[in-house]
Amino acid sequence: QVQLVESGGGLVQAGGSLRLSCAASGSIFSINIMGWYRRAPGKQRELVTSISSDDDTAYADSVKGRFTASRDNAKNTVYLQMNSLKPEDTAVYYCYADLDTSTTRRTIHWGQGTQVTVSS
């Protein structure tokens, strides 16, 4: 089994910063891509960022220049540094990991979600 445990959400004023963490554990052979989605009330799920095992990153246009993803492969952990937060960043943030549990089995796993609320 694989678990993804998130931390770091909370309430912050507009212009503030938060750092999310997501640690993967369990029967992991290797992790290919890690990243974050978010879902705001009444909106569709949005891919915020993805980061490969080689630290190649991609970001949604809405967060470029404000959010930074990073990984610690030794700890199977992905981070999301969120700066200059805006009220429209308010959402539940879910981390995900595209990983191999063996040399022949590749699956995607999700964290439980962490609430980020940005007040104006």
Image: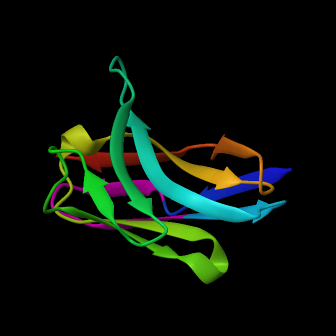
Foreground residue among 104 and 7: 104
Percent x, y for residue 86?
18, 49
Percent x, y for residue 105?
76, 46
Q: What secondary structure predominates along the stretch shown in magenta?
A: strand
| Snapshot quadrant of residue 51 | bottom left
Residue with the most extreme front position: 104
Residue drawn 16% across the image and 55% down it: 64
Is 33 above or below relative to 96? below
Residue 51 on the magenta span: no
Percent x, y for residue 63?
19, 51
Residue drawn 44% across the image and 62% down it: 52
Percent x, y for residue 78?
51, 66
Residue drawn 68% across the image and 65% down it: 30
Residue with the most extreme bottom position: 74
Would residue 10 appear left or right of 110 to someone viewing this image?
Answer: left
Is 39 above or below relative to 74? above
Would residue 22 appear left or right of 101 to someone viewing this image?
Answer: left
Residue drawn 39% across the image and 53% down it: 50
Q: Which residues are magenta?
A: 9-21
Residue 19 on the magenta span: yes
